[in-house]
Amino acid sequence: MTRELDLERRVSVLSGMRDAVGAMKSLSAHHFRETRSVATSAAEYRAGVEGIVSRVGLGLRPGTGVVGLVVVGAELGLCGGYTSRIVEKAVEHRAQVGGGPCFSVGKRTTTMLSRKGVSVTQGYTGPSGVDGLSSLLLDLAESLLTTFVEQGLSALDVVSSHFSGVGSQRPNVVRLFPAPFATVAPELPLYSALDTFISAATREYVFATLYEILVSALASEHGARLLATGSAERWLEERVELLQRRLTVARREASTQETIELSARRS
């Protein structure tokens, strides 16, 4: 009887875990589809803004200071080694460019960076879906622009995962400031003063580029979570089926033993 109770408890616990993982998998699938639906548009918009900025010039000029770093990882778990690979890439890049202010997106990312000895200047809560990107984008962009100008940074790099398909998340380094493209001689817009237009174009370039990076990173995170939760769900399902078979055998043996004992008493 004790064995049966133990097996029943294990089946109950693993079944609950399987249901929870399945719910997380379904939620990630929803967010993944949602994120991928806007990723293409974000890339196209960023390319258009970049084309404008390359023709009128960029309002930000690199200083002589250190290189700043932005690390975009996961806010939640159940996505395998997704965040650890990004953090490893960030630590490696930090060793190459030297110390500087570091901004982190995702609580797990902030924790891992601290464990690796990287001091985080400002940490941000990572969004779970596209709806949460706007508020993060505004706060992050303002902080980056202010820090770049006030501290006279020579560059600002972003380490994140570039989405290229489910199961192929790849940590990537993107230089946000100064612009990683050449600019031609400024062309004066006919409807605005050049300085005003360049200032507006610069801010739009920052917002568009950061948004595309965050969207791609979010798609990568949910893609990684889909794989991890799918594997965990299959393993839990296999364990539940195995334990249920053992429970059936245990009940059959207990029933047989009870029958034998009753027969022995009657005889």
Image (cartoon, rainbow, N blue to C red):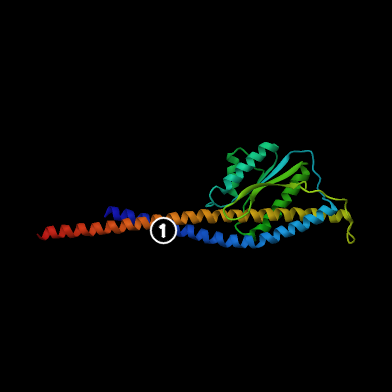
Q: Is residue 71 visible in the rendered structure shown here?
A: no
Place of residue 118 in the rendered image (x, y in percent of width and height, measured from the top left): 63, 39
Place of residue 55 in the rendered image (x, y in percent of width and height, measured from the top left): 84, 54
Mark 1 closeness class: few <14, some 14–19, many ≥20 residues within 10 Å? some
At a point 53% along the width and 49% down the height, the residue shown is 80
Place of residue 134 in the rendered image (x, y in percent of width and height, measured from the top left): 68, 58
Place of residue 181 in the rendered image (x, y in percent of width and height, measured from the top left): 78, 49
Placement of 51 over or under 108, stated as above or below: below
Relative horizontal placement of residue 12, taking residue 217 as reference (left or right): left
Which quadrant holds residue 69? top right
Which quadrant holds residue 89? top right
- Type of amino acid at the residue the image marks with label 1: Ser
Relative horizontal placement of residue 86, taking residue 140 as reference (left or right): left
Q: Quadrant of the N terminus?
A: bottom left
List the single residue furthest toward the left: 267
Residue holding disc 1:
15
At a point 77% along the width and 58% down the height, the residue shown is 48
Q: Is residue 213 visible in the rendered structure shown here?
A: yes
Relative horizontal placement of residue 105, taking residue 81 as reference (left or right): right
Asked whether 93 or 106 is in front, the reply is 93
